[in-house]
Image (cartoon, grey):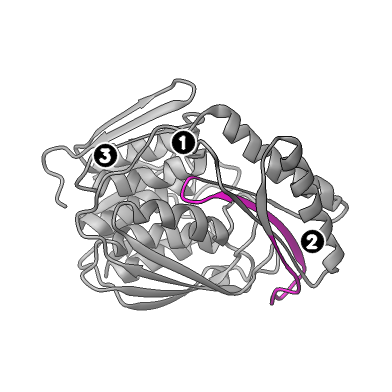
């Protein structure tokens, strides 16, 4: 099978999704024109880490796994669970996102014969990627509905740009897996939150939390917002994270010159926007779920705010690998339905 790596969103997501499915299904795949439309085409350091990690888990033969490569051939031999250690920042010494690597590895390891323990080093809280709290509070609880057991322990925070964070992810295989159904948002969402700082004054975390509580109270909502200070890390950083368990998560990172209140506002605005959409899950969870649901034995249906480029691209990749019935309606909210087709091996 050969896939155009510039299709749709045309970024690292095609690489991660295609190789994860290749390992999960034991199918060879070739990618061409990898990130061809991006300012820096080809495989970048964080993508190489994913390629090589999936190659280890799938005992794969690989050609083209080099910095800047726009073509890759990946031939998995055998899926093996167990204990693994991967450093996302090893290729460039910075804060590559461990959450994206964890997500890619989770898909095949959910189908392994044995349980797995992953030690992942890199960026735990970086721009343009979900923080690891999103995995623990949103993705993993959603996947638990399929029968997949996954847990995460954060032992060292890895803020951008220093990185160097460490998490341990444990995965219990799911077997065939059940379907996932979520068509309506929670009637009374139980919102949880976190305001955290490393190597910065506690007062910043307090200001973030206070702003979150004020904004949500004004919207008629409550939240249990925890405060964590002096989290172990190589560098400084601040975070606001808000979640509805197994449905949605929203985060904002502090930046130099940005008031704590504005950081809080960014996370709250995302949350309120999702609630106003009437969707059952957020856009990030939507595209994360689709590959797992495509491999499940049961049918699935859910709604999300929009048909994001990431969702459309993941759906395209899944259709190349599997004869699933996958329907996406570009309504408001968007509707996604999946059912196993003939040839799908639980």
Q: Nearer the viewer, residue 37 or 86?
A: 86
Report whether 253 appears left or right of 139.
right
For the N terminus, give its image quadrant: top left
Disc 1 target residue: 280
- Badge 1 marks a residue whose secondary structure is loop
In magenta, the rendered stretch is 226-247
Residues under labels 3 and 1: Cα distance?
Answer: 27 Å
126 lies above or below 327: below
Report whether 75 appears left or right of 66.
left
Q: Residues within 10 Å of mark 1 (few under 14, many from 20)?
A: many
Mark drawn on residue 320: 3
Q: Residues within 10 Å of mark 2 (few under 14, many from 20)?
A: many
Q: Residue at x 45, y 53 (%)?
A: 139
Asked whether disc 2 touches disc 3, contact meaning CB atoms under 8 Å apart, the reply is no
Q: Earlier in the sequence, mark 2 or mark 1?
A: 2
Q: Residue at x 68, y 65 (%)?
A: 159
Q: Does the segment drawn in magenta span residue 150?
A: no
- Badge 3 marks a residue whose secondary structure is helix
Report whether 171 appears left or right of 342.
right
Disc 2 target residue: 205
- Badge 2 marks a residue whose secondary structure is helix
230 lies above or below 71: below
Q: Does the segment drawn in magenta span residue 245?
A: yes
Image position, residue 20 (x, y; %): 33, 56
Q: Which of the two discs, 3 and 1, sits closer to the camera?
A: 1
């Amino acid at each position: 099978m050969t896939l155009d790596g510039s299709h749709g969103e045309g970024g690292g997501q095609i690489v991660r999704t295609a190789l994860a499915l290749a390992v999960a299904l034991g199918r060879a795949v070739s990618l061409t024109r990898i990130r061809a439309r991006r300012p820096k085409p080809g495989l970048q350091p964080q993508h190489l880490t994913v390629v090589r990690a999936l190659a280890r888990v799938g005992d794969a033969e690989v050609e083209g796994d080099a910095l800047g490569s726009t073509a890759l051939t990946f031939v998995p031999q055998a899926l093996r669970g167990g204990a693994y250690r991967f450093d996302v920042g090893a290729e460039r010494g910075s804060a590559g996102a461990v959450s994206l690597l964890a997500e890619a590895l989770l898909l095949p390891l959910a189908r392994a014969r044995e349980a797995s323990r992953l030690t992942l080093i890199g960026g735990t809280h970086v721009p343009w990627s979900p923080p690891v709290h999103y995995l623990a509070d949103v993705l993993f609880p959603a996947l638990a509905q399929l029968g997949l057991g996954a847990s995460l322990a954060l032992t060292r925070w890895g803020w951008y740009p220093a990185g160097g964070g460490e998490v341990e992810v444990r995965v219990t295989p799911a077997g065939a897996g059940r379907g996932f159904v979520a068509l309506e948002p929670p009637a009374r969402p139980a919102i949880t939150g976190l305001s955290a700082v490393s190597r910065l004054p506690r007062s910043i975390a307090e200001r973030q939390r206070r702003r979150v509580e004020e904004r949500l109270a004004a919207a008629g909502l409550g939240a249990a917002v925890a405060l964590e200070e002096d989290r172990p890390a190589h560098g400084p950083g601040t975070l606001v994270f808000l979640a509805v368990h197994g449905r949605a998560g929203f985060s904002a990172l502090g930046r130099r010159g940005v008031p704590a209140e504005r950081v809080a506002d960014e996370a709250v605005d995302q949350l309120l926007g999702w609630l106003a959409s009437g969707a059952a899950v957020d856009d990030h969870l939507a595209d994360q779920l689709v590959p797992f649901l495509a491999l499940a034995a049961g049918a699935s249906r859910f709604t999300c705010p929009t048909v994001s480029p990431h969702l459309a691209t993941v759906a395209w990749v899944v259709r190349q690998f599997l004869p699933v019935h996958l329907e996406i309606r570009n309504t408001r909210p968007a509707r996604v339905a999946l059912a196993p087709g003939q040839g799908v091996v639980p």
